[in-house]
Image (cartoon, coloured by chain):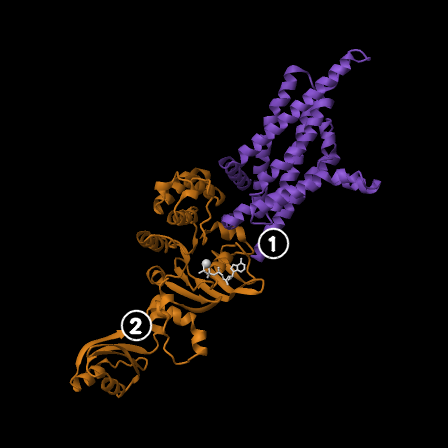
Amino acid sequence: MIEVQHLTKRYGPTTAVDDVSFRVERGEVLGLLGPNGAGKTTTMRVLTGYMPPSEGKAIVAGYDVFDQPLEAKRRTGYLPEAPPLYPEMTVRDYLAFVARIKGVPRTERKARVGSVMERTRVADVANRHCGKLSKGYRQRVGLAQALLHNPEVLILDEPTAGLDPKQIIETRQLIKDLGGDHTIILSTHILPEVGQTCQRVVIINKGRVVAVDTPENLTSRLSGSETLYVQVDAPGAEVKEALEAIPGVTRVAPADARGSLVGFEVNSETGRDIRRELAAAIVRHGWGLLELRPLRMSLEEIFLHLTTEDTAAEGAPDSPSAPPEEAVHE
Amino acid sequence: MNNVLAIAHKELKGYFASPVAYVVIGFSAILFGWFFINLLYFFDRASMQAGAGFGGPQSVNVNEMLISPLFLNVSVILLFTLPLITMRTYAEEKRSGTIELLLTSPLTDLQIVTGKFLGGLVLYAAMLAVTVVHIGFLFAFGNPEWRPVATGYLGLLLMGGCFLSLGLFVSSLTRNQIVAGMVTFAVFLLFWVINWIATFTGPTMQNVLNYLSITEHLNDFARGVIDTKHLVYYVSFIAFSLFLTVRAVDSERWRG
Ligand SMILES: Nc1ncnc2c1ncn2[C@@H]1O[C@H](COP(=O)(O)OP(=O)(O)OP(=O)(O)O)[C@@H](O)[C@H]1O
Ligand SMILES: [Mg+2]
């Protein structure tokens, strides 16, 4: 439904998007994930025909966005990063105007505007001027605008930015509901959002694709080696030694210590389950085993792992991909 | 065509939702009124002198003495009011990001530019319509010829169209509407004084400059003559400016 082939976009000397390729199947919801300045907005602007690519091409709903822009645009709904509202128009008038330029037939316009306002929950501000709306409502009117002509393809640039928690949940649900009938690309920095709404994720960093997969696969694949967390009631140094002696264990790192309790992160070879041996060894030493659980890398860690990969590789090759804490909370 | 009208309609609503339309119409009505009163006073004196003069009671032509100079004075009003109409057209859409909506909708650049031009032209026509009241007085109390009045209005509409298309082009080059307004005013001023500069130059240069001057072409219209030469000038001026605007929007796209 959407096909991006070797897309490159340069702004003068800076390359914002660098040889990006991916596909989105009909009815799929794809998440475009990346840190600030990764090139998400730029990619979307090319896909919507707002700007031409420097190289490569993009095919949306069967039409090349550069060669047949009108056909592609007729089938695309777009929520830009900044909702494109006219401050002096009322929400209803604004949506009626957008419906008109998107080619909704005159007889259907009123009904479409009404149903879209219901769906995006902006009916209560229908007669308010767009310039007087709060950020969250602006965002919702922007979303309404994208849905008006019932396009096959929806391109949503940070659709939940500026919404309150309740609205975020409702908007994610709306996007999920729209998936299936519509093919959707959404961009976000919020990782749980991807897990909840998208079937597939494209992670981009500095204009390049660093991973394309399902959220589940990303989590398990990137965990690489298995990591376990054990908490033991025993003297720390002895435990570390004992654990390192277990076959298959590659690394034991102290995680925390509270009184006589010590916690360790234990890495093992990929695909090898060492939980039984681990438990047996601890019991054999007569220590108390208080906790034993697998640590999965969260999407957050994966994201940071992938997007800071090159710096980590240059520095310490085998250092654990410890994420800088502050970057996680957006 | 529906798309062009949709844009034009939106533009017009924008003008009337903001003070622009009222300022423009009010300002031009006041200025036009002032010119009207002054010329009327001058005309009154002239006709009294003519009546009392040696040639016996001889009527002074209302069209020549009053209406025609009045129309020529309107160019001064346009100088100040039309930049207000065009300065926000593109600049504001770019600043607020609504241009992203227009450029990702199934519209061609030409449709957008033409729609914006048409919206401005209708507001300008409304501005001229107010002046019909003044002229109406002359028809009520005298009997001027209607033909020079009609061609005069046609000329004014075309001349304003030139200024509007030029202003639209300037607006498409920036995202700051104040800058757009000031540059537009400066460019208008240049086109306005061009034939004034022409009087200081040699005969060939004078012809060239006179031809370029937007206001110079109004003279014949104000006298009741529709000359294709002037029609061609105005229409091609508008077409060329709109073309440049389309190019400017397109090249902005490439630069990003
Ligand atoms: N109009 C422009 N002119 C020049 N450079 C630009 C322009 N727009 C974006 N860039 C640059 O291109 C790169 C990608 O920007 P882009 O807006 O696509 O990032 P993004 O992934 O959407 O970021 P964010 O998460 O902050 O929205 C950045 O380095 C940015 O500085
Ligand atoms: Mg962005």
What residue appears at the point 74 percent right and 32 percent down from the top-left corner?
Answer: B227
Q: Please, which chain is the residue tagged with disc 2 on?
A: A
What residue appears at the point 76 percent right and 38 percent down from the top-left corner?
Answer: B196
Is residue A38 placed above or below A263 in the rendered structure? above
Is residue B31 placed above or below A219 in the rendered structure? above
The chain coloured purple in the image: B
User: Which residue is disc 2 drawn over?
Assistant: A296
Please tell me which residue lies in front, A262 or B121.
A262
Visual hue assigned to chain A: orange
Q: The C terminus of chain B appears in which quarter of the rendering?
A: bottom right
Q: The N terminus of chain B appears in which quarter of the rendering?
A: top right
Residue B236 visible (yes or no): no
- Dividing the picture into quarters, in which one does residue A32 lie? bottom left
Pinpoint residue A183: horizontal percent, then vertical percent: 41, 56
Pinpoint residue A148: horizontal percent, then vertical percent: 42, 46
What residue appears at the point 35 percent right and 70 percent down from the top-left corner?
Answer: A301
What residue appears at the point 34 percent right and 70 percent down from the top-left corner?
Answer: A219
User: Could you say which disc has been placed on residue A102 in the image?
Assistant: none
